[in-house]
Image: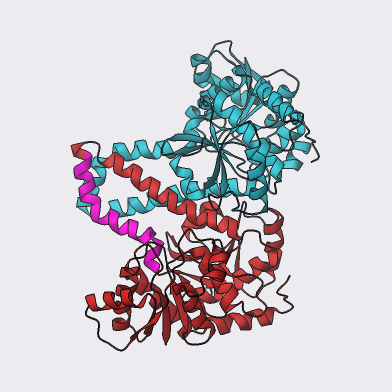
Chain colours: A cyan, B red
Amino acid sequence: MRIAVDAMGGDNAPFSTVEGSICAVKEYDVEIILVGKKDIIQNELNKHGYKGNNIEIVDADEIIENDDEPTKAIRSKKNSSMVVALNMVKNKEADAVISAGNTGALLTGGLLIIKRIKGIARGALAPVYPTKRGISLLLDAGANTDSRPKYLQQFAIMGSVYCEKVLGIENPKVGLVNIGEEEKKGNELTKAAFKLLSDTNINFYGNLEARDIPEGYADVIVADGFVGNIILKLTEGLASAIFSMLKDEFTKTLKTKIGALMLKPGLRKFKKSLDYSEYGGAPLLGVRGAVIKAHGSSNANAIKNAIRQAKVFVDNNVIEKIEKDIEILGGNDDRE
Amino acid sequence: MRIAVDAMGGDNAPFSTVEGSICAVKEYDVEIILVGKKDIIQNELNKHGYKGNNIEIVDADEIIENDDEPTKAIRSKKNSSMVVALNMVKNKEADAVISAGNTGALLTGGLLIIKRIKGIARGALAPVYPTKRGISLLLDAGANTDSRPKYLQQFAIMGSVYCEKVLGIENPKVGLVNIGEEEKKGNELTKAAFKLLSDTNINFYGNLEARDIPEGYADVIVADGFVGNIILKLTEGLASAIFSMLKDEFTKTLKTKIGALMLKPGLRKFKKSLDYSEYGGAPLLGVRGAVIKAHGSSNANAIKNAIRQAKVFVDNNVIEKIEKDIEILGGNDDRE
């Protein structure tokens, strides 16, 4: 299996991307194609003394920056590491692509270059969401802004497939994020989506109130991209605010400092369990290839995790299964 | 000033409502009208040995339960404590009404019985949102499901007035909840609302990413009712999940138990700062009267705080100021 890594994407690139790739080829049966500025990448490889045959460099001399406008960047920076990596998947020169770079550009590039699966109306970004019971999958976390009920139905199907095949959760429960538990609750979108999801061949849990998301009652958390993005970002912000406020409390007196010291290992472990970058990256579901968005601040370990995730994604034929399920659903139109 | 309290509404009614009212008349210059089953209320007053003249009982023998369908309950339970209390404000027999009962019924009742301020298209539920910097006001937290840009503009105006007059924050900064900071980001609703808010006579901060909500960058957090409700409920759920997971970590070994004991006072204080019921209740803004929704699980202290809040609301002529600001905005139509 060949996995293309956008070596220049992310806050810690190319250090993290090169080191993570070296760790991955040592642990997993994969070949990595590092895409980016050849000299810089080779230099990094040399630093780590890597001399194996499982890493290849493909030169690309442009970089899509975080503040680049996504569509413009994808169209104009044809020789950027991200666009070259995406094209490798399109041209079947790679089985998967990973980038920790500009999220919007990767989503746009995935859709424009690799293109959608037949029958899929919209792609969805699907990060892992840590809960009290373990992990859930949240989608769409922001690939779209305005959604139709049909999109949410397809998100539910794609999320179920990914959850089962990659996260290993059998017959995953699908919850629809809503402002009440009852069927009739919600806005126009969720009321219509509830009906559609009830008629879909998935394990539909029903409406999921936001209060219950962290409890882990649903394995697949379905929301439109605006709401999903709010959920993801608020969770990040709140966890970070709570930890920073706790830290202030804990450093107030000698007594609290000693108390905090005794709790440090547990706190660190707990904080880690909330950190979704620990679980690899977020797939862009709905395109004809495995596209994984790693967190912008990914370190080598996070890149390695994303590579493992891409391998499981490809090994388990996620795309073929989505294609089949969408075909069974039938009657879809890309322009719907 | 006369404040009607729905004595039968809430998980701890009538104990909390009666006790909270007694505390309030002792501390503040207010008269309380306890609305509900006369015998039960009188019995509670006797238990506390209250013999003053600042609490009056108005008999109402029905109760709107939490699982009653709001509109149906308001229309059919004419002699419920909530409907009778709302009618007292409508008929100018009371200056404000407080209820810890069925939220949907109170919102519906406020709009149907007391009616909207001229020019206001929709009412908004506006709870306090605790942040790292203190408190912000979040609206709409769920009075509406589908919203138009114009509603969000009016929420921003009403929120600014309330924030200044009741929370005492001068020239409050208004943030629009969105999935990016730039003006062009968002869904159709927020993109249009951004333009409207930019042209409104408020202190517009711009788009506010969900990640930054807990930071307290904005004093007034504007969102449509669906998104606002998700923000409120997710915050509750996440804070509760984090504390329960921390508790699990802290009780694992003797060492962590001792550590946790040393941190207990600080943790308790911190938890309290996140508990929005500490700040009284959430006003239903946009109606022609002070309607305060206290938290369902309000204890006597929360009811007392809600009474103080209602007093400040009325003392500072919030409704007259909203009326004036909406009139200045001009050109509104209730059916818009």
- Above/below status of A312 relative to A273: above
Q: How far from the left and from the top, in percent, is residue A247?
A: 33, 50
- Above/below status of B240 relative to A84: below
* Res. B241 visible in picture: yes
Magenta residues, start to end: B256-279
* Res. A252 visible in picture: no
Q: How far from the left and from the top, in percent, is residue A169?
A: 51, 27
Give the residue drawn at x 39%, y 68%: B279
Q: Quadrant of the C terminus of chain B?
A: bottom right
- Above/below status of B197 relative to B320: above
Look at the image and say whether residue B45 sits in the magenta stretch: no
Q: Give the overall secondary structure of the magenta segment.
A: helix
Q: Quadrant of the N terminus of chain B?
A: bottom left
Residue B259 falls left or right of residue A97: left
Give the residue drawn at x 30%, y 37%: A266
Give the residue drawn at x 21%, y 36%: B253
Q: Quadrant of residue A225?
A: top right
